[in-house]
Image: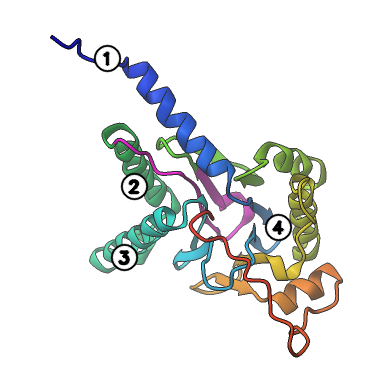
Amino acid sequence: MTVPFYVSPEQIIKDKADFARKGIAKGRSVVVLQYDGGILFVAENPSRALHKISEIYDRIAFAAVGKYNEFENLRVAGVRLADLRGYSYDRRDVTGRSLANAYAQTLGAIFSETPKPYEVEIVVAEVGRIPEDDQMYRLTFDGSVADEQGYVAMGGQAEEIATALGESWAPGLSLRDALTSAVAALAAGATDRDPPGPAQLEAAILERDRPRRAFRRLPTARLAELLGEPVPGPPPAGVAESPDSPGVEG
């Protein structure tokens, strides 16, 4: 007669959490921070097609690290939920808080009810009409929610990046200063590789003064201008670009 194999619930939860953390730590980091004109998102991401930063609704955006296919599923679900709620009721009923709560329920259910948790960490941010109304919610793989103020860092070396941001960020930064602070913080976490340049960055903003759709991406040329660096050009003839892509790890 075989003896049944038993694993305590505490050990199962610990193993799931360790698995998710290891997967998230493999991803390159994302920084979200307030500046005088809204909210800035900056990610290490050389891919121009697989986005870590996306618009969700009029004044709400989404940033994520971890498994691309998993956080893309969450992004699509958030867009559908926001569109349905805005169509069924009123566009003002779609808020960052309601979306964060919906994501928390989904991530919590996946973590507790399925063998494999999502290897993702996300931020849902909503820009207000005044800085005091800005909202930033950080959600972890188990559905935990944190209401962040000022700035937040996710992904590999998040602690080092958050420490660097704490030393350089201040309320009321201009877009140029906020971007410089974010890139310097990402460089502080990139101890095993060269600091990211404009071509290796994905950036977007939620602009406070835009009348409805506040989300706007910052192209590479604009990033180079703000950072005071040469605008990256195409590679010389006969030289292939490096196929650097986040793949399934975002």
- Amino acid of disc 1: Tyr
Residue 29, magenta (yes or no)? no
* Residue type pointed to by label 3: Gly
Q: What secondary structure is marked by label 4?
A: strand
Mark 1 nearby-residue class (10 Å; few <14, some 14–19, many ≥20): few
Closer to the camera: disc 1 or disc 4?
A: 1
**Residue 66 picture location, percent across and down:** 51, 49
User: Counting residues from the N terminus, which is met first, the one under dot 3 or under dot 1?
Assistant: 1
Nearer the camera: disc 2 or disc 4: 2
Q: CA distance from mark 2 to mark 4?
A: 27 Å
126 part of magenta stretch: yes
The residue beneath circle 1 is 6
Report the residue marked by disc 4: 35
Dot label at residue 102: 2
How far is the residue under mark 3 from the one under mark 2? Answer: 15 Å
Front residue of 137/67: it is: 67
Q: Position of residue 79 (x, y in %)?
A: 36, 63
